[in-house]
Amino acid sequence: MNLQKVFAELLQRIGFPTETISNHWGNLEKAYSSNSRHYHNITHLEEMLLCFETYKQHLQFPDEVLYALFYHDYIYSSTQKDNELKSAEFAVQLLPENITVDKQIIFDMILATKEHICNGVEDEKWLIDFDLKVLAKEPEEYAMYAQQIRQEFSIYPDILYHPGRKKALTHFLEKEFIYQTETFRTLFESKARANIQQEINNL
């Protein structure tokens, strides 16, 4: 699976001028390859793209989902709380005038990855679940994910990080469901909850 190829084909398909696509890819790759990104990086996009390819037959707006997927963490700083809003604004601002996708749907989809709650079209549920698929990894892989998140928040000492991380994780467990789609609930809900509880226990 070639991330750059999928990205270029998407932009070509939805109406970006061919001569601009290489530059857009370069900017995207640079953003997601920042040294401060230990989890929210190119690998994260690749794993989400794998989910997209697996479940895209369920999507009503596949191009909107795919574009939102690429840009949902474009702007990311562990010390800021408006990453998703800034990423959504940037992603929509990039779109040419005569585009074949719905700008509002894309904007809303990226915003939905902040609280992981669907307030718009059904496809938001799939994007949210793609983003949260990591929570249901095998325990060893989940432990690696947890360590990557800790590295992204390395400016905070444990005395500050642990309570904040525990609060965020507990928020997931307090929900009736972590995942938005029946498919992900059936396949991954129990494993995600077990992983989250284990991380809380380790803090």
Image: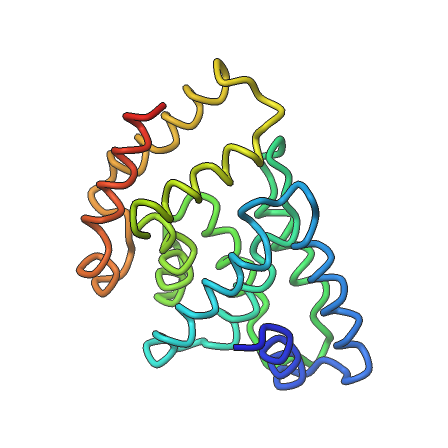
How was the colour assigned to the protein in this rendering?
rainbow
Using the rendered view, name the quadrant where residue 38 is placed.
top right
Q: In which quarter of the image is the C terminus?
A: top left
Residue sitting nearer the eye, 121 or 151: 151
Residue sitting nearer the eye, 138 or 112: 138
Residue drawn at x 28%, y 41% is 195
Residue drawn at x 56%, y 34% is 151
Say if 113 sits above or below 66 in the image. above
Q: Position of residue 109 (x, y in %)?
A: 48, 59
Task: Name the residue at the front extreme.
Answer: 140
Task: Name the residue at the top extreme.
Answer: 159
Q: Where is residue 124 in the image (x, y as percent from the top left)?
A: 40, 61
Say if 163 sits above or below 138 in the image. above
Residue sitting nearer the eye, 177 or 38: 38
Q: Position of residue 140 (x, y in %)?
A: 34, 45
Residue drawn at x 46%, y 51% is 113
| Direction from residue 40 to residue 189 in the image, left or right | left
| Direction from residue 124 to residue 154 in the image, left or right | right
User: Total number of numbered labels?
Assistant: 0
Residue drawn at x 25%, y 36% is 173
| Direction from residue 42 to residue 52 in the image, left or right | left
Using the rendered view, name the quadrant where residue 51 is placed.
bottom left
Q: Position of residue 187 (x, y in %)?
A: 21, 61
